[in-house]
Image (tube, grey):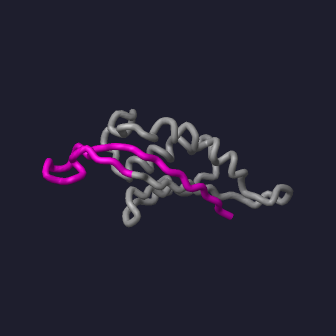
Amino acid sequence: MEIFGVYHLEAARRLPHLPAEHPCARLHGHSFRIEVHVAGPLDAGKGWVLDFADLDRAWQPIHAALDHRYLNDVPGLANPTSEHLAIWIWEHLKDALPGLVRIEVRETERSGCVYRGE
């Protein structure tokens, strides 16, 4: 069974490895939509995989570190593509959420990435 939580971040960034004429090389912001997926057996007594409150608690330090920040200044995010952001989030959640199976980062309604801890 798999559950997920949906979270939001407002953050600014620039992608430093792009040509100067690329729009993402300039400072810009996104309203990121993040999904955190956890899988595991259904607890017969409680009837759930994980308490959603535990998922929210695990998310709080991520939110504090990234929300309303300039992502390029966050250690480990010097090149804050959606892909690097997904990996960064995974690395910061994996110990708190042993059943972590997927991080989805959407930077717009039409674009994003999925990371499964490869």
* Residue sitting at x 25%, y 44%: 27
Q: State the residue lying farthest toward the bottom.
A: 110
Which residue occupies the extreme right position in the image? 45
Image quadrant occupied by the N terminus: bottom right
**For residue 25: magenta?**
yes
Does the stretch in magenta take in 99?
A: no
Q: Relative to 26, is 85 on the left or the right? A: right
Instruction: Say if 54 sits above or below 43 in the image.
Output: above
x, y percent for residue 62: 52, 40
Residue 20 place in picture, x, y as percent:
14, 47
The region drawn magenta spans 1-30
**Where's residue 79, x and y in %?**
31, 43
Image point 38% across, 60% down: which residue? 108
Q: Locate residue 70: give its quadrant.
A: top left
Q: Residue at x 41, y 47 (%)?
A: 85
Please give the name of the residue rendered at 47% of the width and 55% of the height, measured from the top-left corner: 33
* Side of 17 where 42 appears, left or right: right
Count of all numbered marks drawn on residues in the image? 0
In front of the other: 98 or 8: 8
Q: Position of residue 5 (x, y in %)?
A: 60, 55
Q: Nearer the viewer, residue 99 or 67?
A: 67
Instruction: Answer with the quarter of the image where residue 78 lies.
Output: top left
